Image (spheres, grey):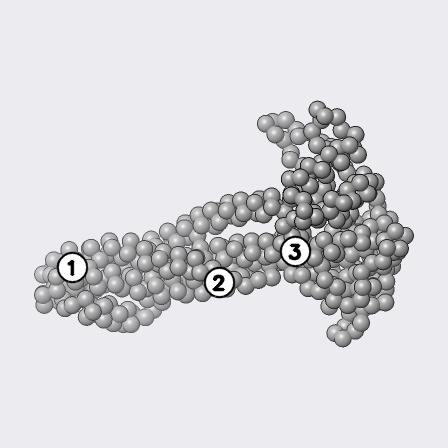
Amino acid sequence: MNFIENVGEGIKSIKANKLRTILTAAIIAIGITSLVGILTAIDAIQTSVEESFSNLGSKTYTIGNVRSRGSVGGKKAKSHPKVKYEELQKFKELFQGYGLVSLNGVASYNSEVKQGSKVTNPNVMVRGVDENFLAIDSYEIATGRNFSASEIQNGSNVAIIAHELTETLFDKGENPIGKKISFLGANCRVIGTLKSQGGSGGRGNLDRRIIIPLNTARVVGSDRNMSFQATVAMNNSIEMDQSIGVATGLMRAIRGERPIDENSFEITANKSIGERLDEISGYLKVGGFTIGFITLLGASIGLMNIMLVSVTERTREIGIRKAMGATPLKIRQQFLIEALVICQMGGFGGIILGITIGNVIAQVMGANTFIVPWIWVGFGVMIGMIVGLLSGYLPAHKASKMDPIESLRFE
């Protein structure tokens, strides 16, 4: 019996035991699904977050409060006073000529918005901005207009709403422009709507927010409780390090810091955000791979047990084949082929399920992209082959060593 005939015998045996084959393949599919699903979800979320931050451009950075770092070496990290609106306003005036500056701050992360009888969930971000915000953050107006200089300066009760709010608060085909909405105790007139941004990540859901003049936000959100930041878009003629150096010097002077003092504010460039995201993503992938590997290890042990049971059940068949001249190599090949085919069936099913489940999880978590991670697909196929070989070797070896006379006596 040549190799091709042995493959045929292996497949014929698989078809003859459909229920066992399906159950065994399902065990492998669960292991591959967990591995591919976790890694697919991580890749999809990472892609969405990277697209979200790419809207800011590669030549932007933000100036804001120093993030809390807890305790360092058993000692509580030094706290710094919050960056004030007046300080950032002065920075904006002094930074002219070096780049475009936008001042902004969040009045609420969980506001409830009403329009007539319709109301949103209490998960809407209300952000106060100035006249440069939309240009720097690459938002696009879908309908209506941007804020005027007088509306920004006077803190008018006007608002620009994101795509999801347009769909939630207004009927299909209804024009939101000029309509009144209420939130945080204020009534604002809608002057514009934004195109869908999608994505989530560190900037929250981009389609679930309201943008209002910064001075309006300081009233409705309580100026004392708000956190303000400046987003800087550099001139093309200035390098990132040079621009950040100028900004750092200005902010230190504005906040009255001595040469020996450390910075009481934080400057974050988009490049460093991307590096941190890559680092976090790497850790998540290691964790996801570990969880998937443990699940797959359990699946391979289950497959090995089922194959050992199969060898015992087919003892008489093995004896007949050996009596008719089948060599131990041919017997071993048949059982290895069966294990490989079953693993590949489970592997391909697990890959499809993993990609689907991984993308669904990513969508639920706010990602706006569907990806097929070809690297993990290839990895899943390879893992399926390795699991098949490792799980099938012991049963195949046991079958090949059986004594034909003793096997024929088996009842």
**Residue where numbered disc 3 is placed:** 55
Looking at the image, is mark 2 or mark 1 nearer the viewer?
Answer: 2
> Which comes sooner in the sequence, label 2 or label 1?
1
Quarter occupied by the C terminus? bottom left
Local SS, label 1: helix
> Which comes sooner in the sequence, label 3 or label 1?
3
Local SS, label 3: loop
Q: Residues within 10 Å of mark 1 (few under 14, many from 20)?
A: few
Q: CA distance from mark 3 to mark 1?
A: 61 Å
Residue drawn at x 69%, y 29% is: 262
Question: Measured from the top left, where is residue 296 in percent x and y?
Answer: 39, 54
Residue drawn at x 48%, y 62% is: 372
**Residue where numbered disc 2 is placed:** 372
Looking at the image, is mark 2 or mark 3 nearer the viewer?
Answer: 3
Q: Residues within 10 Å of mark 3 (few under 14, many from 20)?
A: few
Is residue 127 left or right of 270 when viewed as pictured?
right
Q: CA distance from mark 2 to mark 3?
A: 23 Å
**Residue where numbered disc 1 is placed:** 329
Amino acid on which the number 2 mark rests in the picture: Val
The one of 198 and 350 positioned closer to us in this rendering: 198
90 to 124, vertically: above or below? above
Amino acid on which the number 1 mark rests in the picture: Leu
